[in-house]
Amino acid sequence: MAIAEMKKLRLLALRKDKARLLKVMQKLGCVQVVEQADEAFPADTLSAQKLEELQKTIGRLDLAIARLSPYDMHKPGMLSLPPEAGEDQVTLAEAGRGDTMKVVERVEEIERTRGELRTRENRDRAQLEMLRPWEAMDVPLDKLGETRSALVWAITLPQKNLIAFEERIKALGPARIDPVSRVRDELNLLLAAHGSVREGVEELMREHGASIVRFEGVQGSAALNLDLLQGKLKRIEEVRAQLQQEVQQLAGHLPELRLLRDVEALERSRLEAGQRCIDTRSAFLMTGWVPAEKAEALKAALRKVSPECETEFLDPEEDEKPPTLLQNHRVVAPFETIVRMFSTPDPRGVDPSFVMMPFWVCFFGMMVSDAGYGVVLGLAAAFVWWRLGDRGLGKMAFILTMGGLSTVIWGSIYGGWFGTTPYKPVLDPMNDALKVLVLCVVVGFIHLVAGMCMSAYLSIKRGKPLEALFDQGFWLMILVGIPLILVNGTLGGIIAVIGALGVLCTAGRRKKGIVGKVLGGLGSLYGITGYLSDLLSYARLFGMGLATGVIGMVVNILAGLLWGAGPVGYVLAIAVLLGLHTFNLFINALGAYVHSCRLQFIEFFGKFYESGGRDFAPLREDTRYVMMSREK
């Protein structure tokens, strides 16, 4: 339950050592470089150009990897860890950059060729579709057209207008039409006429909705051109198959491509950090944030690379807000993701992860509330966590593992095992609903008290113990004294009255005048209604837990009815049990996760949490495809 103390780093070193110093910082992963702006020192244009080139190279590598990945014969599983890469592999990747980029160039050439093939194929298929209706026409298409004495046109005409158009053409004079084909409601016709009746033909075509089909640049008959186009399309498919085969072979280079991509990305991170420094011709100045416990180790590592460098570690000034780095035991650390879902804590605040974790786990188990579901969820999540560790989904898997364990405990107390109750439970949510509801409210009361204690701790930490007494201590006396009356009326009443008087006298201390102070105290006392509404929020622990058990019981009843229908019923009953219990587990686990977070964010964090921080983002070996196995 700690936020790491931060030191401001000032590093002055020779510019020739800059790249090596940045590489050391990246390996250590403990320095967040801060942007510095000084108009007196111009930007490092050389590094900017190199950074731009790196961006382009990484983009090309990403595109090549995306194109080849579907053909990867050794795809890593979803639960597989990335391969490790040591110094030797990185050195080989850097040395073989030229050969690897040739693979990228070939992939790019293949993609360009594929694009050209698609263009040609679309063009040829469009021409194919245009010529297909005229396949039966033996007149060469380049002979269609008009001269001074005659015209020969390929035309289309709506079928409904054929009879009228044919009669009018015959009456016109030396003209005739010959049918070629029909496409839906359109007729394809060959029209021949003497040049003297051209104007009459054009007028008839306009009246009957006919139009001329032009075959620009096409030589020979439609049938001949169709054969040629079919041949072209066949050759395109052959070339495409050859390219596909080559791409499958190039997919064997994916490990080198992925490694080089991550190596280039690491260099990009170093250059981006270097851009935040102030450079002169021979030296550079860097400012950054470092966890205090890492300062000496960092200083020794930097001096080892550059004995001439000068380092200075300073405390943050009052108006400075350093980045926030949460430090917790590995059991608690995964729950930091839930804290960050709400907001990163203020660096001068408090990390609630350690105190929040047991409550979150407890609430999750009370809401899922079925031990059988807990076993399934816990084992599945534990397997994912075992495979991934603390990387990627591994943290979430650990959270769900703890939630599954809590569910087994609470499910055993409630007697719920896949919607059945095989033994007399310690607490029965269906038959002893009031007892379970009271338990939920008691757990919520402890949760609220813990939040107030966290607020008091924060005040004491800042050297304000009286504020802790006035703002939290007296309220704690009220909240503890009122339920204590049920056990010992005198003692509980005395504690509650002392707390109420304390709130009345101190809550308005910042108001002006006696009347303002009294009214402030009375208004604060009225706030006890807010605590009552907060306690009612914890009734959801009972409601969602009861819903899980009821739905599971209904599923079992439905399966039991199907079971009595013979062999087919057996199959249906098993399908219903597996399908609906899986759905019930999923939907209730999702609801329990959301509502457990909600109780933390609203009821718990609302008592003390100070947000507004920004995560510590050091220069580190942040990779996508491989894990760097280097000595730190």
Image (spheres, rainbow, N blue to C red):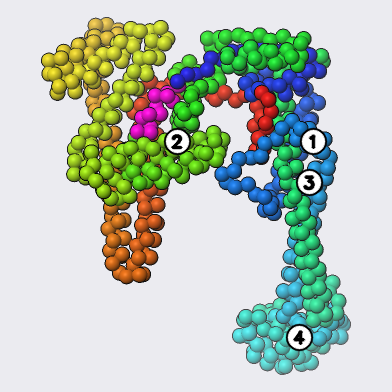
Would you call the spot at circle 3 few (<14 residues within 10 Å), some (14-19), or many (20 or more)? many
Q: Examine the rendered structure and indicate whether residue 372 appears above or below residue 513.
A: below
Residue 432 in magenta stretch: no
Q: Furthest residue to the front?
A: 423
Q: Which residue is mark 2?
A: 399
Residue 371, quarter of picture: top left
Q: What SS does tag 4 mark?
A: loop
Q: Which residue is mark 4?
A: 136
- Disc nearer the start of the sequence (2/3): 3
Q: Are marks 3 and 4 in contact (CB under 8 Å)?
A: no
Q: Which residues are magenta?
A: 351-362
Q: What SS does tag 1 mark?
A: helix
Q: Which residue is mark 1?
A: 92
What is the three-letter code of the residue carrying label 3? Val
What is the three-letter code of the residue carrying label 1? Leu
Would you call the spot at circle 4 few (<14 residues within 10 Å), some (14-19), or many (20 or more)? few
What is the three-letter code of the residue carrying label 4? Ala
Q: Residue at x 48, y 15 (%)?
A: 348
- Disc nearer the start of the sequence (2/4): 4
Q: Nearer the viewer, mark 2 or mark 4?
A: 2
